Amino acid sequence: MLIQSAFKPSGAAATLPPRPNFKAEDTLDTVVSTLQDQWESRMQGQARCRVGIFVERSYKPTEEHDDVLQLADAVMDAGGFPSLLYINKSGQSVEQQLSQVDALLVPGGRDWDPTLYGEKLGPNMDPNEPDRAWDDFEIAGYQYAIGKNMPFFAQCRGEQGLNVAMGGTLYQHLPADHPSSINHKQPREGTSLAFRAEAGHALLVEPGTRLHEIVGDEALICSDHHQGIKDLAPGLEIVARAPDGLVEAVQVQGRPHQWAVQGHPEEFRYTDGRMQAIYQQLVDDGAQYRSQVSNLFSAASSNHTR
C-alpha cells in the first residue's frame, strides 16, 4: 500500500530534533531541566496546553531518533508544551505531577513485570529488564488519568501498560508465545533507532474508531516490540490488529480520547500527515480538557463567594 504524504514539514518539523549532548555524570534531574529549558525557549509561552510525557529513571537521550525527543517535537509542532514526568528526588507523586498537565503521552521502554498480571518471568525474559517501581508509577498514572477522564495517547510499552493497568495480560516474548510469519521486532544496525522510520507491517483498523477517522482502513507502522497484548483487559476495546491477529491498538470503551497503539507513529509523521494528526488530536483534546477544568474551577469559585 502506497502512503500519500499529506503533511508538509516546515520549521522544526522538517528535520529531526537536535542531537542531544549530555555528559555521563548528568543526572535525570539535569537532563529533564535542560530539555525543559530548551522547549520553553522554543515555545515562548504560546502553548495551548501542557502534555505530560513519562520518562524512565534511566532516561538519557543519546540520538535524534530517541522516542521521547521525537514525541516532544510532535507535541510542540501541534501547539502543545511537553512536560516530562518521572520519579524525581523531590518525591512528587505521579498524581501530583499529572495534576499540572492537561494530557498524557506514554512512550515505549522496558519490559513489564509479569507478576503484575499473575505470571512468573518466562525463559525468554531478561531478569534485569523489569523495573517494578517504574511499573507502579506508570500504572498509577493510568489510574489517575482514567479517574479524571484526562486524555492520553500511549505507544509500544505504553499500550501494553494500559492493558496491564486495567487487568489484562501480555505475551511475554514474541514470536515464541505467539507464532507468526510477521517479524514484530524489526532488524536494526547497531544501537540507532533510525530503523523506526521504516515500515514493518500493516495496521488493519476497525471502522468507527478515532484511528480509523485519522488513517482509514489501513496504514503502515514500525514494529519494534517483543511483548504484546494477550488477554484484553475489561474496559478496553480493540482499535486495530496486525495481519497476524495481534492487537495493535486499543481504546478505553466509550472514551476515544484515551487510547494506545503498539507501533511508533512519531517517526512516520515526516512523510505521512496522518501520523502527525495523532499528536495534533492529543493536543486538541488536552486544550479542551484544560478549558473544562478551568470552567469547573471558575464555577466552584463563583459558588464559594456567593
Image (spheres, rainbow, N blue to C red):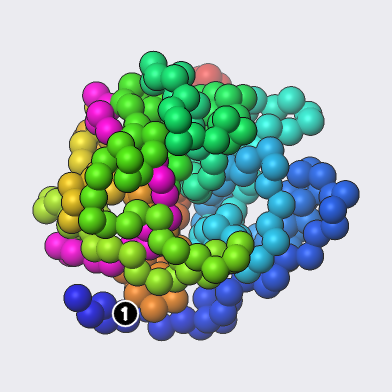
Quarter of the image where one finds residue 118: top left
Answer yes or no: is residue 99 visible.
no
Above/below status of 57 relative to 33: above
Q: Position of residue 221 (x, y in %)?
A: 33, 63
- Residue drawn at x 56%, y 79% is 15
Please tell me whether residue 300 is drawn above or below residue 282 in the rendered image: above
Residue 236 left/right relative to 111 = left
Which residue carries the number 1 mark?
6
Amino acid, disc 1 = Ala
Q: Point out the stretch of residues depicted in magenta.
A: 216-234
Q: Position of residue 251 (x, y in %)?
A: 28, 40
Q: Is residue 220 magenta?
A: yes
Residue 61 screen position, x and y as percent: 68, 57
Name the residue nearer the viewer: 256 or 166: 166
Residue drawn at (34%, 49%) of the image: 261
Image quadrant of residue 213? bottom left
